[in-house]
Image (cartoon, rainbow, N blue to C red):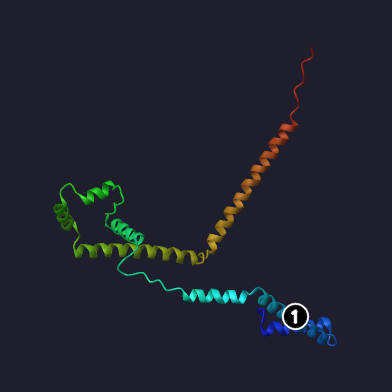
């Protein structure tokens, strides 16, 4: 009724029970039922007074009394015949191919200067034999294997730890570092001495007039 299912009615009943209370709920339900009955009775009286039921019944009977119109198969309509003829004529017209400009390479492949047969013969003659193709494939495979071996060698060298130095090599490197530090100190001392010498030089006296 009114597009409300059983679950919705239960929810509405719970809400009314909470809002109104159990004591006033029976009176409220009686009022709602009475109002619904009054509404139905007023609707029936209105339909009876206007005669709408009879009008609808007459309309249904009139529709049933109309004879069914079935067009004859042998006499198609003029509009349908004209549409069919137009479709047939459009299908019979040859479609124009889409214009496409060929490149120089495509034109040469389509019409070679020496002729189609001669070009095909030359292509067959210049085509490598099975042995030559095997040699080419072997050379490519060897090149790939060589590149892979180089890559693996580089990766292995990068992963290997640096070689350990001998005692003599360690002492030689330490001596080189000590000599480099001494040279730096000597250069710094020379710069300091030059700066002090410039500072100790007396300023030239001005000539007395």
The quadrant the N terminus occupies is: bottom right
Expressed as whole percent of the image width and height from the top left, the position of residue 97 reads 29, 52
Expressed as whole percent of the image width and height from the top left, the position of residue 163 reads 50, 65
Quick one: SS at disc 1? helix
Foreground: 184 or 102? Answer: 102
| Residue hosting label 1 | 38
- Tell me: 190 left or right of 125: right
Quadrant in which residue 95 is drawn: bottom left
Foreground: 154 or 115? Answer: 115
> Measuring 79% from the left and 14% from the top, which residue is drawn there?
208
Quadrant in which residue 152 is drawn: bottom left
Foreground: 142 or 7? Answer: 7
Expressed as whole percent of the image width and height from the top left, the position of residue 164 reads 52, 65
The image shows residue 20, relative to residue 118, as above or below, that is below
- Dot 1 crowding, Cα within 10 Å, few <14, some 14–19, many 20+: few
Quadrant in which residue 139 is drawn: bottom left
- Tell me: 51 left or right of 164: right
- Tell me: 190 left or right of 175: right
Expressed as whole percent of the image width and height from the top left, the position of residue 90 reads 30, 56
The image shows residue 204, relative to residue 150, as above or below, that is above
- Tell me: 33 left or right of 49: right
> Measuring 80% from the left and 83% from the top, which residue is drawn there?
31
Number of marks in picture: 1
> Measuring 69% from the left and 75% from the top, which residue is drawn there?
46
Single out the residue that lies furthest toward the top: 209
Foreground: 80 or 17? Answer: 80
> Measuring 44% from the left and 63% from the top, which residue is drawn there?
154
The quadrant the C terminus occupies is: top right
The image shows residue 194, relative to residue 6, as above or below, that is above
């Amino acid at each position: 009724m009114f597009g409300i299912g059983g679950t919705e009615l239960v929810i509405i009943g719970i809400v009314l029970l909470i809002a109104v209370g159990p004591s006033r709920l029976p009176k409220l339900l009686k009022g709602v039922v009475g109002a619904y009955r009054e509404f139905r009775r007023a609707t029936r009286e209105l339909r009876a007074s206007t005669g709408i039921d009879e009008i609808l019944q007459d309309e249904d009977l009139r529709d049933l009394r109309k004879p069914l119109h079935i067009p004859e198969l042998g006499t198609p309509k003029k509009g349908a015949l004209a549409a069919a003829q137009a479709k047939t004529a459009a299908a019979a017209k040859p479609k124009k191919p889409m214009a496409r400009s060929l490149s120089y390479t495509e034109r040469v492949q389509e019409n070679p200067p020496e002729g189609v047969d001669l070009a095909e013969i030359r292509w067959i003659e210049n085509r490598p034999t099975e042995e030559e193709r095997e040699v080419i494939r072997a050379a490519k495979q060897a090149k790939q294997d060589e590149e892979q071996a180089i890559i693996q060698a580089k990766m292995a060298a990068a992963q290997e730890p640096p070689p350990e130095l001998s005692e003599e090599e360690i002492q030689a490197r330490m001596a080189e570092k000590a000599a480099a530090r001494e040279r730096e100190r000597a250069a710094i001392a020379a710069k300091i001495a030059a700066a002090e010498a410039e500072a100790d030089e007396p300023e030239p006296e001005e000539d007395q007039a």
